[in-house]
């Protein structure tokens, strides 16, 4: 039996884990336990994903959330170490770049449990982002590094990691869109809306700077469409704290489920976001994207012209809106695999376990 301990805690990780868990379930000699760190805990940031995407119920919920990064990561580490000292798994599986990813990676490495990192090799080259630190450290202690794109493989080789540990498997989020997009058309959006732009905003570099937030909001105000904004709790708290009033064309709704997001993507004009995942999902659903960050881990989208990187500038958002409005057909990129990343990941895990 290959016993895998999967550690997830934040919204995008639930979606990625759903894809791989489904592929693991095909093998009777594999057993997966899911550990939820508790990083995201609101019903609409967590439970809804487990229900909707049919993810196995977590065997443990560490209930660690909020507070500073050190405290959050430290508390997760303490609890994970306790669990794995008692029952060590054969492998630890982590996704992406959150504090939950880093906590699990460090504990696995120190206990000499092989660590599998899905979404390895992504870099923004901005070490002020907590996510960049998390992914750098996770990759450097990982034993099996599974990259979504050829570029990610190349970036790892620049850091001296270019060996049997590194594989291009494709993007599990592409698998997810392929698998769920038909089903998504049956769900209801939280409000009835048409002729809209889909927007999300939660990245720390934007929500912790009043100047950046105001610029982005002014950019959104200049858009000649309604803006559907499913509001992340971090951003909601900042709006309240800074007493920011939103312009009339912005329609705020609570965080949406994965299927609702896919449906909202299918009906929108284009996307404005600072999320990593949504930049790709926009492309997978044939929509142009304006990214309110200074850099992106998904550079191939920018190079091919489907993603406009504008930082936090109202003026640049305005210019980008004009550009994306004139584009209706997107080029085809083959960087993200064929929708079989989940199967490939499980095949490599099984090989590694032998
Ligand atoms: C985290 C990840 C980020 C990922 C994002 C997806 C890190 C460093 N960042 O950012 O990579 O893209 O998740 O959403 O791990 N909160 C709630 N309810 C919740 C969840 C969070 O109120 O269900 C609050 C937290 O208490 C905190 C704030 O929102 O005050 C931010 O949450 P946090 O987990 O720190 O980071 P995210 O911004 O969600």
Image: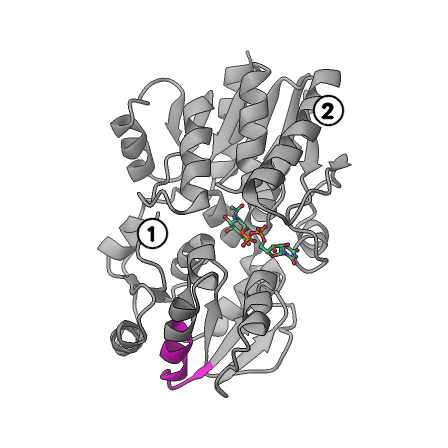
In this view, the residue in front, 323 or 252, is 252
- Asked whether disc 1 touches disc 2, contact meaning CB atoms under 8 Å apart, the reply is no
Which disc is residue 27 wearing? none
* Image coordinates for residue 284, horizontal then vertical, percent: 41, 57
Q: Quadrant of residue 206?
A: bottom left
Residue 209 inside the magenta-drawn segment: no
User: Is residue 169 among the parts visible in the rendering?
Assistant: no
Quarter of the picture holding the N terminus? top right
Relative to residue 313, is residue 306 depicted above or below? above
Which disc is residue 296 wearing? 1
* Image coordinates for residue 260, horizontal then vertical, percent: 60, 65
Q: Residue at x 60, y 47 (%)?
A: 10
In this view, the residue in front, 155 or 141, is 141
Relative to residue 89, is residue 214 depicted above or below? below
* Image coordinates for residue 294, horizontal then vertical, percent: 31, 57
Residue 219 inside the magenta-drawn segment: yes
Element at badge 1? Answer: loop
User: Is residue 161 among the parts visible in the rendering?
Assistant: yes
Residue 119 relative to residue 54: left or right: left
Mark 2 surroundings within 10 Å by alpha-carbon count, few (fewer than 14), some (14 through 19), many (20 or more): some
Q: Earlier in the sequence, mark 1 or mark 2?
A: 2
Question: Which residue position holds label 2?
Answer: 83
Magenta part of the protein: which range?
A: 216-226
Element at badge 2? Answer: helix
């Amino acid at each position: 039996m290959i016993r895998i301990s999967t550690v997830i805690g934040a919204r995008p990780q639930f979606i990625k884990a759903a894809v791989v868990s489904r592929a693991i379930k095909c093998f009777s000699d594999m057993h997966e336990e899911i550990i939820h760190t508790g990083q995201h805990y609101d019903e609409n940031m967590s439970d809804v994903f487990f229900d909707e995407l049919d993810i196995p119920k977590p065997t443990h919920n560490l209930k660690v959330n909020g507070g500073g990064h050190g405290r959050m990561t430290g508390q997760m580490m303490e609890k994970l170490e306790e669990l794995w000292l008692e029952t060590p798994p054969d492998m630890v599986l982590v996704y992406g770049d959150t504090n939950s990813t880093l906590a699990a990676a460090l504990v696995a490495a120190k206990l000499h449990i092989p660590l599998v990192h899905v979404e390895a090799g992504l870099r923004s080259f901005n070490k002020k982002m907590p996510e960049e630190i998390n992914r750098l450290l996770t990759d450097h202690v990982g034993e099996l590094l599974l990259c979504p794109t050829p570029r990610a493989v190349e970036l790892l080789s620049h850091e001296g990691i270019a060996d049997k540990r590194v594989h291009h498997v494709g993007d599990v989020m592409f698998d997810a869109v392929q698998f769920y997009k038909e089903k998504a058309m049956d769900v209801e959006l939280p409000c009835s809306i048409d002729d809209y732009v889909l927007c999300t905003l939660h990245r720390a570099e934007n929500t912790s700077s009043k100047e950046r937030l105001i610029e982005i909001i002014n950019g959104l105000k200049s858009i000649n469409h309604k803006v559907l904004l499913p509001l992340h709790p971090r951003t909601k708290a900042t709006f309240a704290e800074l007493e920011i009033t939103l312009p009339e064309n912005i329609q705020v709704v609570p965080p949406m489920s994965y299927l609702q997001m896919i449906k909202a993507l299918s009906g929108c004009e284009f996307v404005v976001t600072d999320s990593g995942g949504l930049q790709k999902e926009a492309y997978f659903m044939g929509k142009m994207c304006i990214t309110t960050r200074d850099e992106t881990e998904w550079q191939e989208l920018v190079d091919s012209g489907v993603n406009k990187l504008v930082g936090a500038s109202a003026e640049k958002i305005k210019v980008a809106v004009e550009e994306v409005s004139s584009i209706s057909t997107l080029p085809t990129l083959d960087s993200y695999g064929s929708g079989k990343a989940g199967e490939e990941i499980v095949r490599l895990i099984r090989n590694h376990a032998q």
